Amino acid sequence: MDLKQIHELIKIINKSNIGEISIEDKDGKVTIRQKEEPAVTVAAPVHQVYSTAPAPVAAPAPASAASAPAPAAAPKADNLITIKSPMIGTFYRRPSPDKPILAEVGTEITPGKVVCIIEAMKLFNEIESEIKGTIVKVLVEDASPVEYDQPLFLVEPA
C-alpha cells in the first residue's frame, strides 16, 4: 500500500462508525483506529463487564424494595428486573422540564419504550426498556449523576 491509499482509508474511517480496520497484504499490515471519542460510544466490550458487576449491586436493591411494601410483595421481589444505566451521565426522568415524566412507579413499559434520558457530553440519550413489565421503584433522583451499570429502575416483568 502506498501513502495515498492509507490517507484515503483514514478519511473513509473518520467518516464512518468503524472503530478499527486492519489490512494485510504481501508488503505488510496496516491497522487504523478511530480516536477515543468514537470508541467511547461503542460499548460492546464494556457490556461484557455488565453481566458480572450487577450481582452485588442488584442484590440489596430488591431486598430494600421488598422491605418497604407489605409482606405480600416479598415473593415478587425475587423476580424483579433491574434496568441499569448503559453509560455515565446525568439522569433525567423527562425529556424537557415542560414535558411529563417518562416512567414512574406503576407505569407499564414494553420493549422500545423510553424510560429516561441520560445526558453525556451534551448529548441526550434516550434509554429504552428491553423488557415488558411494570415499574415498581425508581432508584435515582431526577437530574442526578449516574455511573455505568448503576441501577435506575426495578421492574416487575409481565
Image: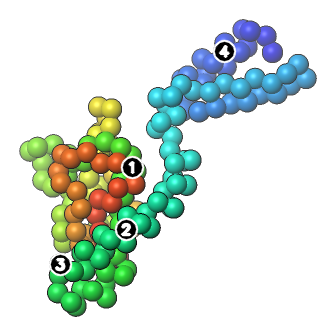
Question: Which mark is in front, 4 or 3?
Answer: 3
Find residue 130 and report its horizontal and vertical position in percent: 40, 62
Observer-nearest of 76 and 102 = 76
**Where does label 4 land, which residue?**
8
Amino acid under label 1?
A: Tyr
The residue under label 1 is 148
Task: Name the amino acid type tagged 3.
Answer: Ala
Whether residue 96 sits left or right of residue 153 in the image: it is left
- Separation (CA) of disc 4 from disc 3: 61 Å
Percent from the top left, x then y, of residue 100?
Answer: 12, 53
- What is the spatial separation of the Cα atoms under label 4 and label 1, in whole angstroms? 36 Å
- Give the secondary structure at mark 1: loop
Q: Earlier in the sequence, mark 4 or mark 2?
A: 4
Structural distance between the alpha carbons of marks 3 and 2: 16 Å
Q: How is the image coloured?
A: rainbow
Q: Badge 2 is on which residue?
A: 58
- Give the mark nearest the N terminus, 4 or 1: 4
Horizontally, is 148 left or right of 70 in the view? right
Residue highlighted by disc 3: 68
Q: Residues within 10 Å of mark 4 (few under 14, many from 20)?
A: few
Secondary structure under the numbered disc 3 in the rendered image: loop
**Residue 73, picture quadrant:** bottom left
- Sequence-wise, the earlier of marks 1 and 2 is 2
Question: Which SS class for mark 2?
Answer: helix
Q: Can residue 43 be seen at all in this image of the molecule? A: yes
